[in-house]
Image (cartoon, rainbow, N blue to C red):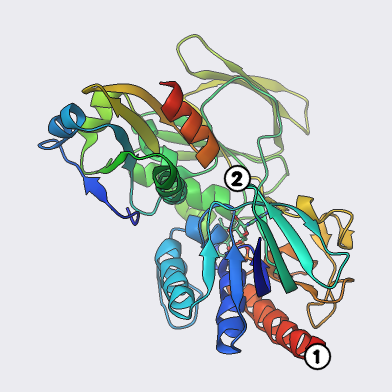
Amino acid sequence: MKTYDLVIVGGGVCGMTAAVYAARASLSACILEKDVCGGLVNWTHTVENFPSHKSIHGMDLMSLCREQVEELGVSIEEVEDVERVDFSGAEKRLFTSSGEEYTAGAVIVATGRKPRPLPVQTSFERVHYCSVCDGAAYRGKNVIVIGGGNSGFDESLYLTGLGVSHVHIVEAFPTCIAAASTQDKARAGGKISVSVSTELVSVAALPDGRGRVLLRNTATGAEDVEETDGIFCFIGQSPNTRPFEGELDLKDGYIRVNADMETRIPGVFAAGDVIVKKWRQITTAMGDATIAALQAEKYLRAMK
Amino acid sequence: MSVENVTRLDSSSFDDFVRSHEGIVLFHKKLCPHCKVMETVLGKVAAQIPMSLAAVDSEEEPALMEKVGAERVPTLALIRGGEVRAVFTGIRNPREVMAWYQGN
Ligand SMILES: Cc1cc2nc3c(=O)[nH]c(=O)nc-3n(C[C@H](O)[C@H](O)[C@H](O)COP(=O)(O)OP(=O)(O)OC[C@H]3O[C@@H](n4cnc5c(N)ncnc54)[C@H](O)[C@@H]3O)c2cc1C
């Protein structure tokens, strides 16, 4: 069993910001991160709205954060998934995938969100959620991108930049919500086509490794079959709150907090993309984290 | 890779490494989040089972990717008995990698 003043669940930008504040308040703190620190920002090629950096790779920005957190003496446990929690006592208990138990006087939940999976069951293996990881295998080939939001368009531009011959963006709603300038750029290049009001019905694996995709126009009901080399899925995010179901108050899967980032359980705070809120950005996650960490410090001091 | 004691391989050193080591080679790429996760997973596995760890930058060494039959990253190649015994692409947790390593 490992014991800290504060355990932060999730090492995204929110969790790391909270860790900086906790360390500077001389709390013993630990980040438990199921993958590696950085969270969703690691998946963003270029961040251009973070004050102090005109343009920076998301992963580079997160490496700088991680270095700072480590130098401040915060314990970082990566590939350590919090699977179950017990927040019933004054000492909060957290159980992880490695079989370890952590206890702390206070906890900040900063588990963010994860990409929604493809909405159909298929044995087709070439379904991807990361164009940086998987895009290069499709140079000179055709792919379908599911989702016409900012991610769908940004990733499509990235894929054609890599040398993918053609990207077909499929959007279920009548219009794409991606920024108009990005849509214009994508359409201008001639390698990206867009179908709106179109839903994915099924995907079958073909013997040659390609996929046969059935699409349906939601307005007319007309169906269309398309063969593709791969599918990239960017249809939004859902909150990572499974371990907290039954413990914390959730709304549509997101954690309810008050303005001080307090959950319904004293000593348990939540912050960042995982809470009920309107704007989910790096800077808003950092703001939440600041409040949560300062409030956690106040709570811990009062308990002593 | 950030994991300690990792040998960086290229086309001039890969075959020698395979001939003389037992362990895992990670094919990765810069700015690839899944690759970072697998680096950390491999560090944890190597802390429990003695093995050699090596890394190949897939963008700098496309011929080595082809040699092991890898199209995407992260790909792990298991090296034993002077040859590449097994290859897989994607994410696995330390327990799964240990089982794969011991079962091949
Ligand atoms: C494609 C895309 C592009 C974006 N671009 C921008 C941008 O340019 N600028 C901007 O300001 N914002 C951008 N955003 C939004 C921004 O990424 C988020 O607002 C921000 O990452 C939220 O940080 P977070 O720490 O709350 O959550 P996350 O970044 O999601 O981090 C949560 C962390 O918790 C970990 N975790 C989850 N469950 C567990 C568990 N059970 N145990 C342990 N660890 C767990 C996860 O692995 C993850 O590392 C973008 C989002 C997306 C999807």
Tell me, for residue B104, which label it has, or none. Answer: none
Can residue B99 be seen by looking at this rendering? yes
Amino acid type shown at disc 2: Phe
Q: Residue at x 75, y 84 (%)?
A: A300
Disc 2 C-beta below 8 A from ligand 1 = yes
Q: Residue A52: x, y in percent?
A: 44, 83
Q: Chain of mark 1?
A: A
Ligand 1 found in image quarter: bottom right
Dot 1, how many residues are within 10 Å of its Cα: few (below 14), some (14-19), or many (20+)? few
Most extreme residue toward the front, as rendered? A1
Which residue lies at the image location 68% right of the left edge and 66% below the top edge?
A110
Residue A302 numbered tag: 1
When asked about the image quadrant of residue A119, the answer is top right
Q: Residues within 10 Å of mark 2 (few under 14, many from 20)?
A: many
**A161 relative to A217, above or below:** below
C-alpha separation, residue under disc 2 versus residue under disc 1: 45 Å
Badge count: 2
Q: Is residue A130 left or right of residue A247?
A: left
Amino acid carrying label 1: it is Ala
Give the image quarter of residue A282: bottom right
Q: Nearer the viewer, mark 2 or mark 1?
A: 1
Residue A128, can we see it? no
Name the outermost residue toward the left.
B12
At 45% from the left and 48% from the top, the residue drawn is B44
* Residue designated by label 2: A234
Element under disc 1: helix
Quadrant the N terminus of chain A occupies: bottom right
